[in-house]
Amino acid sequence: MKKKKSCIVDGCLNNNTCLNLTFFTLPKDIERRREWLTLINRQDLLQKENLNHISYVLCSAHFEDSSIIIVKRLNENAVPTLLLPKKFEEKVPIVAEEIIKEGKVYEEVTPRFF
Ligand SMILES: [Zn+2]
């Protein structure tokens, strides 16, 4: 089970059970972290010593789309389902190819996905 984490922005009720949101931990870099905490007005966290930045998250609602890099990842149940080699067994599709050999035209059957 995933640990429930709530967005630390004051007044935001989003937590990581919201499927259409992404959650970002506070930056590791102290300067950037201060900047974030100042912007979201979390003085309490700014003053906290030895803050474990990984324990605090902000939801994607507070970031512009242009700030977010979308990384394509597979979900846990993902299996390949497209363009599988099963097509070899079925011997389809087969493409007829015309090839010119010694000045004559021959027809040759070639499996496409080889
Ligand atoms: Zn939020």
Image: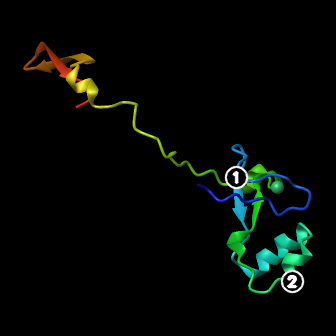
**Position of residue 38 measured from the top left corner of the image (x, y, whole percent):** 89, 73
**Position of residue 2 measured from the top left corner of the image (x, y, whole percent):** 61, 56
**Position of residue 87 measured from the top left corner of the image (x, y, whole percent):** 27, 24
When the figure is inspected, residue 83 is found, relative to residue 90, above or below; the finding is below
User: Crowdedness of circle 2 by 10 Å Cα count: few (<14), some, many (20+)?
Assistant: few
Residue sitting at 89 percent across and 68 percent down? 39
What residue sits right under mark 1 in the picture? Answer: 22
Q: Is residue 112 visible?
A: no
When the figure is inspected, residue 77 is found, relative to residue 70, above or below; the finding is above
Give the Cα separation between the discs numbered 1 and 2: 26 Å
Residue sitting at 76 percent across and 53 percent down? 15
Q: Quick one: SS at disc 2?
A: loop
**Position of residue 40 measured from the top left corner of the image (x, y, whole percent):** 89, 66
Q: Quick one: SS at disc 1?
A: loop
User: Crowdedness of circle 1 by 10 Å Cα count: few (<14), some, many (20+)?
Assistant: some
* Three-letter residue code for mark 1: Thr
Instruction: Specify whether 103 is left or right of 72.
Output: left
What residue sits right under mark 2 in the picture? Answer: 47
Are the residues tagged 1 and 2 within 8 Å (C-beta)?
Answer: no
